[in-house]
Image: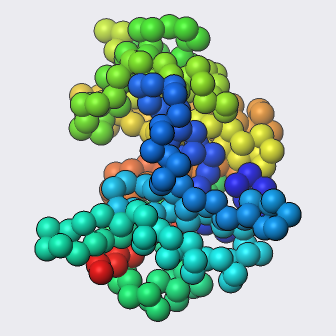
Amino acid sequence: MIETYPITPPDLNREIRGWEGARFHNQDAALDPGWAAQIHLWETEAGKLVGVVNPGGSGEAHLQVHPDYRHRIEDEMIAWAEAHLAVPTEDGQRRLHVCVMEYDVLRRCLLEARGYQKTAWGGMSRRLRLGGQPLPEPALAEGYVLRALRPGDEGDCQRIADVLNAAFNRDFHTAQEFHTFATTAPSFRYDLHLVAEAPDGAFAAHVGITYDETNRRGIFEPVCTHPAHRRKGLAQALMFEGLRRLKALGALHVYVGTGDAAAANALYEAVGFTEACREFIWQKIF
């Protein structure tokens, strides 16, 4: 995947944070034994990896493919996903979702030919080129402290789980889950995982950053604020600090993905992520 990023448009292939999150952001560091049945690889006769199908959520397939081999293997990749990743519906049929960027004419044509329909659900991938763009000094609201996570601090792991659960209305994030990610994911860096600490010591906002050094790309994931601390500019301040740190490392481009939420998209536009690529889910019921 790292080799394909310079020769593919934004988000055609999954960025490294997505892969590392799926593999390491878990309670248990051991490899999920179910992966063997859910992920399929395509190689050339010489052993070069040129295609991968992997699951997203339940009944959702993601296709990663080297652009030089798309016309040879992509239809076969979709067929494999239908056979192995589709889920049953209430009326006894099967359903599969495939994520497609709006610019991707080839995949749209392949899916239409196989009976897929475009849904109204989707998201957005945004890119910011750092270049010579001036970056504001981050400024937090009074009483809050901006800092990076502390290596080996178990309290920080619990506070990260707390802010993730509150911000995304979840209940399954745990300190152990984040500890596994922080200590096993190859690209994890404590200095690129930033928080706004509230006066009571809780984390009011969190921005995680992954840096692909080979391609000089930064990825923001996640970006979140506790509901009790919103509308104070905390996430924006953390993102500005993250951009400053990425620029110091030599990053050229920074990416962030989001859904349709108006507030999130307004934040990213305000920070400077003005290049946006639209994504939709395509569905087949068969």
Q: Residue furthest left?
A: 91
Q: In this view, does 286 lie to the left or right of 222?
A: left
* Image-quadrant location for residue 202: top left
Residue at 67% across, 30% down: 186
Can residue 9 be seen? yes
Q: Position of residue 58 (x, y in %)?
A: 33, 56
Residue at 59% across, 84% down: 106
Q: In this view, does 283 lie to the left or right of 139?
A: left
Can residue 137 be seen? no
Q: Is residue 158 left or right of residue 66?
A: left
Residue at 41% across, 25% down: 27
Q: Position of residue 201 (x, y in %)?
A: 36, 9
Q: Position of residue 85 (x, y in %)?
A: 40, 63
Q: Is residue 34 above or below residue 175?
A: below
Residue at 78% across, 56% down: 3
Q: Where is residue 219 in the image (x, y as percent from the top left)?
A: 60, 44
Quarter of the image where the C terminus is located: bottom left
Q: Residue furthest bottom?
A: 113
Q: Is residue 117 above or below residue 47?
A: below
Q: How many marks?
A: 0
